[in-house]
Amino acid sequence: MGGTLPQGQQPTRGSLALGALAITMLFATGAFVGTSNVVKVGVGAGSATSLASTKHGALWNPKMSPVFDNEPLGKSIVRHFDYYLLNGATFDNGEQKLRNVEQWLAPEFQYHTVGFPNSSSAREWCLGGEETGYRTAFPTTSFSQMLFFGSDKYATTTSYGNALWNATLFGIPAPKKFIYFRVLDFYTVRSTGPGEGLLNWNFMAIDWADLFARSGRPVLPPATLPEGFVMTAHANDGVPAPLSVVAAGRDSVIAKAAAAGALADGWAGDSLDAKWWHRDLTFYGPGGIGLAQGAEQFQQHVLGPYRAAFADRRCETQILFCEGNYCGGYGIMHGRHVGTWVGQAATNRTVAFRFGMHWRVVGDKIQEGWAIFDMPGFLAQIGKDFFAIARNQ
């Protein structure tokens, strides 16, 4: 699989909120047209105005709100990187954009994704990889981050976008309209000195099953559970959740034990009745699985069908970390496909497909969970072309 972490970086294995509060960020492609050479950037009440990229080559370096001053290193790096992509990159040509992203990306940066091409350097990603491909298909996007947390070694986000799909994507004609989609990212950090580092690996996955269903090109049959609805945490922890100043002091050891248990006993094992979850849980599954509310729905419509469909189940956890009571996990699900899952009849093939999950833990159990699976990767291993199915609708 294409999702293995950089050598030397393998870690040890170890509701509803007020949607109107989502933090919205915009970016668009195309050259900046005008006479001004200065981009003014403001970030909240505590920010200052700063120069971004100019024709003289100044690097993007906006002031950030003091509330972010003591964030974990991985989270801080991603915050600056994302802020540039969402607010400054549209004004830069290729080489100037590369100079800017090299403030946060290691030269050996590995970018792994679903659908778009992988990249093996910062230059390749910036000038010819997903960054270019995405902006060509979706020239204007508003992203609303729901979760964003990190440690000194890792960071992760999950967001939804409202994007103008304006150009052909994977051979699929553009509907020429705005479309909603869900996305997640996981990052690893290479230390470059005390309190300093660069991102050297990133996994990005879009919930393609939901996106194509919304565009009238469904690849998977409708789920039993409601689909297409996802929210930030049902807690006053900030949006995206959690603010580091809020999460500080919360027990990450207990939270990590619950997340690890959910993977080992839930997805790989056979624990009954959502052992690591509160009874009134909320689970935001991807297209093909849907939204489970309560332990009974989760057991019957999420874990149950997955367990019945795969023998010899194993969860290869490559990242598992927490900031306070928020945890993120990335890895590969292994199993032999012996039953129907997301509408795909048994093939008896051994498969291995990537996943990204997030959890909010209350006490010693999970209250909310979010998940995206590499559905195109799963279908490819059972002899089907996910994007060809969408293309031929």
Image (cartoon, rainbow, N blue to C red):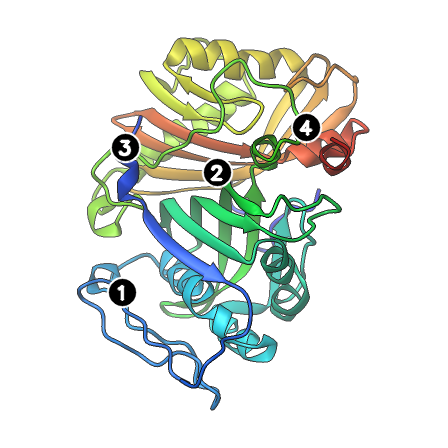
Residue 119 shows in the view: yes
Instruction: Please tell me which residue is depicted at 77% across the width and 36% down the height of the picture.
Output: 388
Identify the mark at residue 100; answer none if there is no mark: none
Identify the mark at residue 17; answer none if there is no mark: 3
In terms of sequence position, does the residue under pointer 4 or pointer 2 come before the other?
Answer: 4
Identify the mark at residue 329; answer none if there is no mark: 2
Name which residue type carries label 4. Answer: Val
**Inter-mark Cα distance, 2 to 1:** 30 Å
Name which residue type carries label 1. Answer: Val
Neighbour class for label 3 at 10 Å: few (<14), some, many (≥20)?
Answer: some
Residue 270 shows in the view: no
Q: Position of residue 374 (x, y in %)?
A: 63, 36
Instruction: Please tell me which residue is depicted at 47% across the width and 46% down the height of the picture.
Output: 162
Is the Cβ of the residue at disc 2 closer than 8 Å to that at disc 1? no
In terms of sequence position, does the residue under pointer 4 or pointer 3 come before the other?
Answer: 3
In terms of sequence position, does the residue under pointer 3 or pointer 2 come before the other?
Answer: 3
Q: Which of 201 and 147 is in front in this view?
A: 147
Q: Is residue 164 left or right of residue 74?
A: right
**Inter-mark Cα distance, 3 to 1:** 23 Å
Is the Cβ of the residue at disc 4 closer than 8 Å to that at disc 1? no
Neighbour class for label 2 at 10 Å: few (<14), some, many (≥20)?
Answer: many
Q: Position of residue 377 (x, y in %)?
A: 70, 36
Q: Name the residue under label 4.
A: 219
**Inter-mark Cα distance, 4 to 3:** 30 Å
Name which residue type carries label 2. Answer: Gly
Q: Residue furthest right?
A: 383
Neighbour class for label 1 at 10 Å: few (<14), some, many (≥20)?
Answer: few
Q: Where is residue 262 in the image (x, y as percent from the top left)?
A: 45, 24
